[in-house]
Image: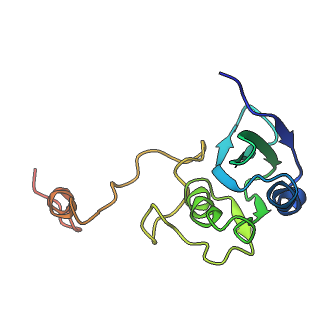
């Protein structure tokens, strides 16, 4: 397996690079957008990963953007690649990476009232199981609702 050429960019460059890849180099498809949390082993803590594909040239390109800090931010590329919208929402939901100027940055996988970002390596384990419509009754039976059974 061969890996595509990878460019390491600064956060403030991602929109300009994405526009150039689309307009000048025919990378007309954003095929992946995700993040990696390297805590506590490495600095910078996070890396944003972007994968681009040129259909006409049958070639791939990757961009890696290092992000520092516990509350990282980067510009949205949803204005360049509209398909990035939901990918960025997923990264926000799971990792807490904020996409500046995003048109609708809200949770997409976790319930709206969920606290924290579950794919961060410092996310504490042992939280209450989330209730979804298909398992609500089962979970509700296990709850005490403030009442404790006599021993």
Residue at 70% over, 36% down? 40
Q: How many marks?
A: 0
Q: Is residue 22 above or below residue 36?
A: below
Q: What is the residue that sits farthest to the top in this orientation?
A: 1
Q: What is the residue that sits farthest to the front in this orientation?
A: 56
88 sits left or right of 49 in the view = left
60 sits left or right of 1 in the view = right
Pick the front one: 107 or 64: 64
**Residue 37 rendering spot, x and y as whole percentages:** 67, 42
**Residue 135 rendering spot, x and y as whole percentages:** 21, 58
Pick the front one: 148 or 12: 12
130 sits left or right of 118 in the view = left
Q: Is residue 76 above or below residue 40?
A: below
Pick the front one: 122 or 52: 52
Residue at 35% over, 55% down? 128
Q: What is the residue that sits farthest to the left in this orientation?
A: 150
The quarter of the image holding the N terminus is: top right
Q: What is the basis of the colouring in this image?
A: rainbow
**Residue 93 rendering spot, x and y as whole percentages:** 55, 60
The answer to which quarter of the image holds residue 23 is bottom right
Residue at 78% over, 61% down? 74
Q: What is the residue that sits farthest to the bottom in this orientation?
A: 103
The answer to which quarter of the image holds residue 103 is bottom right
């Amino acid at each position: 397996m061969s890996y595509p050429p990878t460019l390491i960019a600064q956060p403030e460059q991602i929109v300009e690079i994405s526009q150039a890849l689309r307009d000048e180099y025919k990378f007309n498809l954003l095929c992946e957008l995700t993040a990696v949390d390297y805590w506590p082993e490495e600095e910078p803590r996070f890396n944003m990963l972007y994968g681009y594909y040129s259909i006409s040239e049958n070639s791939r390109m990757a961009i890696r953007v290092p992000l520092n800090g516990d509350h990282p931010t980067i510009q949205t590329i949803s204005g360049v690649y509209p398909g990035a919208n939901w990918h960025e929402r997923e990264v926000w939901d799971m990792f807490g990476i904020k996409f500046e100027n995003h048109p609708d940055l809200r949770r997409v996988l976790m319930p709206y009232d969920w606290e924290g970002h579950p794919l961060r390596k410092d996310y504490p384990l042992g939280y209450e199981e989330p209730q979804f419509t298909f398992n609500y009754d089962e979970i509700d039976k296990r709850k005490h609702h403030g009442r404790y059974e006599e021993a």
